[in-house]
Structures are given as C-alpha cells and as structure tokens.
Image (cartoon, rainbow, N blue to C red):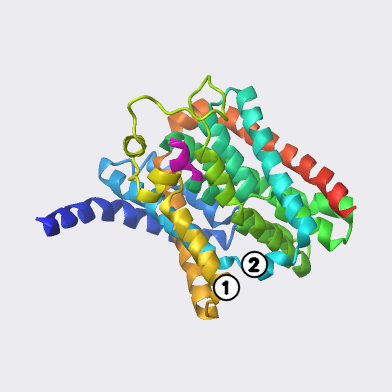
Amino acid sequence: MKINAIKKELDGILPGLAVSILISLVSQYLARFLPTLGAALIAILLGMLLGNTLLNRPGLSQGTKFSEKRLLEYAIVLNGLILDFQVLKSAGLKGFVFIILQMFLTIFVTYNLGKYFGFGKRFSLLMGAGNAVCGSSAIGTVSPILKADNKEKGISITIVNLTGTALMIALPLLGAVLYGSDTLRTSALIGGTVQSVGQVVAAAKLVNDEVVTLATVFKLMRVLLIIVVAILYGRMNMNEGETLCTRKKRAGVTAVEAADEAGTPASPAAVSYGVPWFLTGFVVFFLIRSFIGVPDSVLVASKAISTQFEVAALAAIGMRVKFADIIKEGPKAMLYGLTVGAVQDVIAVALIRVFFG
C-alpha cells in the first residue's frame, strides 16, 4: 500500500516538477543574452507567462507546489555552505553593525510603508525580509512562519526581484558619484542594499573585482542574519488590527493546525520554536563550513545545485501567480517596491557616512 501511495504521489508531482526544471533551464540559457535581468527574474516572468496561458493546467499544480516549497527549502539549506566566519570577519565590527542597522531599519520602514500603501501585515513583512536580507530566499524562509498565501509570496518575490534589478543598475552609478573609487563605501552601498546575492555580484562587477569581493562579504552577513529575522517574525502577531509585537494565539488552534492551514507540514522544531527545519539545516551547514571545513569540490557542487533548485522554485512560483492578482495588486505593489528601494538607498548612504566617513 505504501508503495502505491508513493507512486501516486510521484505521478502527481513529476509533471509540474519537470516543467519547473525545464523553465529553469531555458531561463538560465536566456540569461546569457540578458545578464541584466538574470536567470531568477526571467524564470519568474516566464513561469507567470506560461502558467497563465499554455501551462495553465490542474495536472501541474501538485508538482509546482512541491517545486516552489521543497526546492527553495533545499536551496536555503545548501546556502549555509557559502558562509564562513573567517570571510565575514573581513568587514570588521563596524561593517557588521552597519549591516544590522541597515537591515532592521529597512524592515521597519518597509512594514510601515506597506501599511501606508494599504497592504496587510504578511505581505509587508515578506517585502521587508526580501529587501533587507536576500530576496527570494528570505521570502521563502519566512513565508511559512508568517503563514503567507501563494499570492502574497508570489507577488512579493516578483516585486523584490524587479526592485533588485533596478538597484543593480542604479547603485554602481550612485556609488561612482558619491564615493568615486573608494572600495569600502561602494561595497557597503551595493552589498548592504541590493536584494539577491547574484544581483550584488552583478552590480559589483560593473565597478571592479575588489568591490565584488567586499560587497559579497557585506551581503553574506545579511544572509546569515536571516536566522534572527525568522525568529523575530515567529514571535509577531499576524492578526490584522492588533499590535504587531503582541503575540496572540487564536483560541483552539494549535501550531500543527495552523501549519496545516498554510499547507505546510509542521516539524517538531517548527512547532516548538517557530523555526522551520530548513533554517536549522542552514545553521548546521554554516557551522560545519566554519569550524570543520568542507572540500572545495563540495562547495562548488553545493552552490551549483542550490542555484538550480532556486531558479526552478522561482519558475514554479511564477507559474502559480495569476495575472488577475497582478492586475489587481501589481501597479501599487511595484510603486511600493520602488519606494522601498529608494528609501533603502537613503538609509544606506546615511549609515555609510556615520560608520565609514
């Protein structure tokens, strides 16, 4: 019976999973000719286009749901191997304090701007995590904690990636105007604000290799702090109309039931501490890399696999976003995203002046 159940589940997952992987591969190929957009954004947009037209089929739903959830979780776990205490130390104490303030001011401002634009708590906090930490991966990490729905997750990932693309182009120019050839301040500007790791590297490459190295260090500090953001989010009250920082459980709803409502299985760790299993995996891999060491071949392989999983997950997320939702929320959400991006830059410039002169 178990074998039949597994076979039935695989039969439901494989079509959507295969389509997600195919869109991912096509997106990575197209990214060679459109490097400014990048594979992640192309995968989201192509997934949206096909998911609302040619591939708008119920038979793909189970596989795209698996892809958007599980593949992104596996990618997050593998991302733990790209971090290393020794690498992070190169930015110094000032750099670390700069990143902490930049991130939490970004989340604070993004949340309050979301309220101003009329968005709910979950969407605003998803946008806060995506912009402050590491784009799609951060949204994927906190969405089960916030119990965000597919529409909130899909639109926030799309907007954050579009905002990141805009900043990827604008910040090297802004850095040149404000800081000239100063490596530290330019690296802090790019690494402290641009949304995804890939976008940080792409933006820094428009300056020079020294900026690529140091901007990546600033960015990796943001990635590490997703742990803190996730724990804080898990303690927040998501009931609309109530104070965000007042934890209030709904009567008669257990952690397991709440997780079931969000369509996510509740692991023992998630039930007890509000921390998803993949975030625990991320921390474990980070500690292994930092204190035990990992062969270079394993690091290269894990980075390649993580990239494949993430792009395929983003393709699946795109397929599950409906044009009707984009038409309804898109223009306002895009204005919200660009406003957040602009405010991020202002905060970063002010903090860079304080910490680095």
Give neighbour class at mark 1: few <14, some 14-19, many 20+ (Cα, 10 Å): few
* Residue farthest top in this picture: 241
For badge 2, the amino acid type reads: Phe
As measured in the structure, the alpha-carbon distance from the residue carrying label 2 to the one carrying label 1 is 9 Å
Which residue lies under the disc numbered 2?
85
- Mark 2 vs 1, N-terminal side: 2
Residue 130: quadrant of the picture: top right
Give neighbour class at mark 2: few <14, some 14-19, many 20+ (Cα, 10 Å): few
- On residue 152, the disc is none
> 112 left or right of 152?
right
- Residue 127 visible in the current orientation: yes
Image marks 2 and 1: residues in contact by CB distance under 8 Å = yes
Q: Position of residue 109 (x, y in %)?
A: 69, 33
> 352 left or right of 253?
right
Residue 19: quadrant of the picture: bottom left
Is residue 145 on the magenta stretch? Answer: yes
Element type where label 2 sits in the image: helix
Q: Main secondary structure of the magenta part?
A: helix
Q: Position of residue 131 (x, y in %)?
A: 63, 44
> 162 left or right of 21?
right
Asked if residue 274 is positioned above or below residue 202 in the image, the reply reads: above
Which residue lies under the disc numbered 1?
291
Q: Over which residues does the magenta segment extend?
A: 142-148
